[in-house]
Amino acid sequence: ERFGNPVLIKPRLGQGAFRVLVADAYTRRCAITGEKTFPVLEAAHIKPYADSGPHQTANGLLLRSDIHKLFDKGYITVTEELKVEVSSRIRSEFENGKEYYACHGKDLIVTPGNACEKPAAEYIRWHNDNLYRG
């Protein structure tokens, strides 16, 4: 009773392997900041798994946890040229964002060395068309 009624969840099969593959492809560094403190790094789906985004490295970015949340909420995105875009809505909605705006317009710091692991244009377009709040 202390924690409420039991709840069934559906496991996301492949999520653990996705994290390992993305972390390896990005040499365990945040694609945007270059951060190397592994406990705060997360494998982000560009096109969310819930929207039929696959567990493939080309659909992933290794991001620091705060940037991952902003990416998932559409306040940060990446262009097809692999440049960082930061929405002006961070400033207007939260009266903040100085650290994030410092990344705006810059190239990703880390990208996979293998061309087939780099972010795929189709997933980037999906993120920009469906999630980004630019």
Image (cartoon, grey):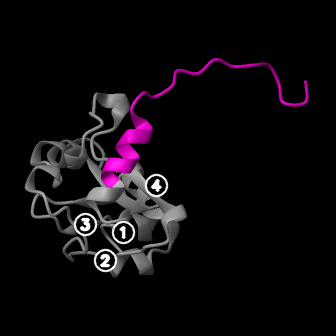
According to the picture, the residue beneath numbered tag 3 turns out to be: 85
Q: Which amino acid does label 4 sit on?
A: Lys
The Cα atoms of the two marked residues, 4 and 1, are separated by 17 Å
According to the picture, the residue beneath numbered tag 4 turns out to be: 69
At numbered mark 2, what does the secondary structure look like: helix, strand or loop?
loop
Q: Residues within 10 Å of mark 1 (few under 14, many from 20)?
A: many
Q: Which amino acid does label 2 sit on?
A: Cys
According to the picture, the residue beneath numbered tag 1 turns out to be: 29
The Cα atoms of the two marked residues, 2 and 3, are separated by 8 Å
Q: In this view, does 13 lie to the left or right of 86?
A: right
Q: Quadrant of the C terminus?
A: bottom left
Q: What residue type is labelled 1?
A: Arg
Residue at the (27%, 40%) spot, across then down: 47
- Disc on res. 103: 2
The part of the chain drawn in magenta is: 1-22
26 versus 7 height, above or below: below
Q: Can you tell which quarter of the image residue 71 is in?
A: bottom left
- Disc on res. 126: none
Q: Position of residue 13 (x, y in %)?
A: 42, 27
Q: Is residue 123 magenta?
A: no
Which mark is first along the chain, 3 or 2?
3
The Cα atoms of the two marked residues, 4 and 2, are separated by 16 Å
The Cα atoms of the two marked residues, 3 and 1, are separated by 19 Å
Residue 134 visible = no
Residue at the (21%, 77%) spot, across then down: 106
Which mark is first along the chain, 2 or 4?
4
Q: Does the magenta stretch include residue 2?
A: yes
Q: Position of residue 109 (x, y in %)?
A: 25, 75
